[in-house]
């Protein structure tokens, strides 16, 4: 939530956020090349503006027309119903997302076209055509049915990036089971929280996953999440609830490592699927049927289960893939995200597959076995559209140009960026070293909540400026506003809001309508508040400045400071903890934890490592603080609120902490108290 009244929001949590000076100084403008524009679906600014205006003037008419490109079992009665904060789209329609991604291509020449070109970390290759993927998804769907999964049940999926992950997701969609994919980097505790919140009936996992040459023990984490006997936690035996709603665990064999299989509960995927029929008609689902839940960090200790429904979400991902990536049948499209995040849901699966595109799916780490792995994949598969994150780009810059320069990447025609603001230096490197100056860059701003891209260049039409996500997508009405809701002047920093509902918007937080309303629609009644700060320049271009709430963007992934704090105070040594972001050259932001210890605990390196390990086991490795600083007290306002702003300054400048790892003296800060009420 916005914190400072009347003042320009200071999204200081994201190290790479653009400053007003850099925005004003940015004079570079990259027009789409004639060659690109000529072949593009939308080939001029005038054409974009005309479509955009039409989409805003009469969204019902605009989206009704676009929705005709999807395959419906039954047409909708009404395009949209908006009773803020609750939206319904394509009311009365019957549709199936998996049918739109698979079946409808089977009567076209796409039938035997590659849907997924998969590459394992160890260079294995698997190609699934649309017909083959359809067959596998149908068989898996029959397995789910045979295990008692019904339309409306929730299925948790905790897997590495193998084709079975895509198959599992689409199999759920096929029968109308709501999937909840849990990123493979999350810990047992995080799995348990998510599974229990969603009351999932089944978990689909695999024995292990390959990552950076090692194995992640996925099944073991699931076993830990499910165990019910008391467990030693921090030296104390604590009762442990497990996941009471889980009936079965379906296990894909990937690594072949030794795992425990619990009879009656655990089932091998390959055995279950062996005799499954490939005949499984797609369920005819209501437009508003919940397609999935995806948990994301918010400003409290508990992650939010973001709910997306079927028709509107599918339309949003379909349309943005079509226009932002200007996807065509000849493309080899590669989005480097993990299906465990929303980017993977929308832009590895639903968006590209509903467009009948060929998708590259890569299992492993970007730099394994060498820093040129991504460029090697682009060269070998002839990737034409490449979509990755600024944090990866910055890591590649540091690794050196010799790695991309070794490879022929002339197949590339379009580049995309997502996850955090891309700093102009990284943008220029992407443009020149990877795109060789000929590929437009689409810097796509969106969120788990928005489901699909909201602000982005349309590559054949909108000239780009390094660091700006440029202009809104069709039907999206963003505005930068002041605390009081009045619109900001050009270049004035403010809060980014979306004024009208859009088809792929979240339909709620699972089982928590109050939090949904409070989180997104209470700051500006009836208007969606994004949690981001932004500016709009004189040309109407949007410059996203990063989060203005207690959410930190670490390597393009969202982490709630409260979540990490509650993990820390869950350790027996910790009395109090405050977590803030510090600018980091590669990750955008790094996590710094200020920790006060209980009596008798030595503030040493061993304890730091233990605390980092503890956070890793409570949430996952991505949440481990980069830096832990022990302190005698946390600076607080008179009302007892931790002064995060101050801590952020300390964390990034080290002004008080200096080189020492313990904050020496808060008496300086004491003096500030009076003036520093947040
Ligand atoms: C937050 C959403 C959207 C998929 C990946 C992250 C930041 C995302 C951009 C961009 C500036 C961006 C925002 C947003 N963000 N894309 N192109 N430019 N910031 O999804 O985990 O839901 O995070 O990521 O701060 O609010 P997410």
Image (spheres, rainbow, N blue to C red):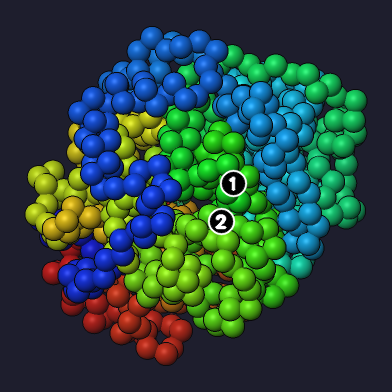
Q: Earlier in the sequence, mark 2 or mark 1?
A: 1
Disc 1: which residue: 330
The answer to whether the residues at label 2 and label 1 have Cβ atoms under 8 Å apart is yes
For image coordinates 29% across by 48% down, the residue present is 44
Disc 2: which residue: 384
| Mark 1 beta carbon near ligand 1 (under 8 Å) | no
In three-dimensional space, the C-alpha distance between marks 2 and 1, rounded to whole angstroms, equals 9 Å
For image coordinates 16% across by 48% down, the residue present is 481
- Depth check: 43 or 170 in front? 43
For image coordinates 50% across by 44% down, the residue present is 327
The quarter of the rendered structure image containing the C terminus is bottom left
| Mark 2 beta carbon near ligand 1 (under 8 Å) | no
Classed neighbour count for the residue bearing mark 2: other residues with Cα under 10 Å, few (<14), some (14–19), many (≥20): many
Residue 597 x, y percent position in the rendering: 48, 71
Classed neighbour count for the residue bearing mark 1: other residues with Cα under 10 Å, few (<14), some (14–19), many (≥20): few
* Residue 578 higher or lower than 109, as above or below: below
- Depth check: 580 or 16 in front? 16
């Amino acid at each position: 939530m916005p914190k400072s009244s009347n003042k320009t929001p200071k999204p200081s949590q994201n190290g790479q956020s653009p400053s007003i000076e850099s925005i004003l100084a940015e004079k570079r403008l990259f027009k789409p090349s004639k060659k690109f524009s000529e072949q593009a679906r939308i080939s001029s600014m005038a054409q974009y503006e005309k479509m955009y205006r039409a989409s805003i003037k009469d969204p019902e008419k605009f989206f009704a027309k676009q929705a005709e490109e999807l395959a419906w079992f039954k047409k909708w009665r009404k395009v949209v119903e908006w009773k803020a904060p609750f939206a319904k789209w394509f009311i009365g329609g019957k549709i199936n997302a998996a049918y739109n991604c698979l079946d409808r291509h089977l009567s076209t020449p796409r039938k035997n076209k590659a849907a997924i070109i998969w590459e394992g970390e160890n260079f294995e290759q698997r190609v699934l055509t649309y017909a083959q993927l359809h067959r596998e998804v149908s068989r898996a769907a029959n397995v789910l049915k045979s295990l008692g999964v019904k339309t409306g049940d929730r299925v948790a999926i905790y897997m590495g990036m193998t084709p079975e992950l895509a198959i599992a997701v689409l199999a759920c969609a096929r029968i109308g089971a709501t999937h909840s994919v849990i990123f493979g980097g999350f810990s047992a505790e995080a799995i348990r929280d998510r599974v229990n919140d969603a009351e999932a009936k089944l978990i689909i996992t695999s024995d292990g996953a390959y990552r950076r040459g090692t194995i992640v023990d996925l099944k073991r984490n699931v076993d830990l999440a499910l165990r019910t006997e008391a467990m030693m936690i921090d030296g104390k035996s604590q009762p442990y609830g497990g996941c009471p709603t889980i009936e079965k665990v379906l296990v894909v064999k990937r690594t072949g490592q030794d795992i425990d299989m619990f009879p009656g509960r655990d089932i091998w995927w390959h055995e279950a699927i062996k005799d499954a029929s490939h005949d499984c008609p797609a369920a005819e689902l209501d437009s508003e049927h919940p397609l999935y839940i995806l948990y994301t960090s918010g400003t409290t200790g508990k992650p939010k289960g973001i709910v997306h429904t079927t028709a509107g979400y599918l339309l949003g991902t379909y349309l943005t893939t079509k226009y932002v990536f200007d996807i065509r049948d000849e493309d080899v499209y590669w989005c480097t995200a993990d299906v465990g995040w929303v980017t993977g849901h929308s832009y590895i699966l639903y968006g590209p597959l509903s467009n009948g595109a060929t998708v590259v799916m890569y299992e492993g780490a970007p730099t394994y076995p060498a820093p040129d792995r991504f460029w090697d994949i682009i060269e070998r598969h002839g990737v034409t559209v490449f979509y990755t994150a600024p944090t990866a780009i910055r890591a590649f810059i540091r690794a050196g140009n010799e790695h991309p320069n070794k490879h022929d990447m002339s197949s590339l025609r379009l580049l995309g960026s997502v996850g955090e603001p891309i700093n102009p230096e990284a943008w220029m490197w992407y443009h020149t070293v990877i795109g060789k100056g000929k590929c437009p860059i689409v810097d796509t701003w969106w969120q788990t909540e928005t489901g699909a891209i909201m602000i982005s260049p349309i590559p054949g039409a909108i000239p780009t400026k390094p660091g700006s996500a440029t202009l809104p997508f069709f039907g999206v009405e963003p505005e930068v506003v002041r605390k009081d809701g009045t619109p900001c002047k050009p270049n004035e920093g403010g809060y980014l809001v979306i004024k009208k509902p859009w088809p792929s918007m979240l339909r709620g937080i699972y089982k928590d309508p109050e939090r949904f309303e409070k989180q997104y629609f209470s700051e500006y009644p009836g208007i969606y508040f994004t949690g981001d700060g932004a500016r709009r320049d004189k040309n109407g271009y949007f410059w996203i400045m990063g989060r203005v709430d207690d959410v930190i963007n670490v390597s393009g992934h969202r982490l709630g400071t409260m979540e990490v704090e509650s993990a820390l105070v869950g350790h027996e040594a910790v009395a109090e903890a405050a977590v803030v972001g510090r600018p980091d050259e590669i990750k955008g932001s790094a996590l710094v934890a200020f920790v006060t210890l209980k009596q008798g605990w030595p503030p040493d390196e061993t304890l730091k490592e233990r605390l980092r390990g503890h956070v890793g086991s409570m949430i996952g490795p991505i949440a481990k603080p980069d830096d832990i600083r022990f302190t005698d007290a946390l600076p607080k306002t008179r009302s007892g609120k931790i002064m995060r702003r101050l801590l952020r300054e300390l964390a990034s400048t080290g002004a008080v902490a200096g080189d020492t790892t313990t904050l020496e003296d808060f008496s300086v800060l004491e003096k500030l108290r009076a003036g520093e009420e947040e």
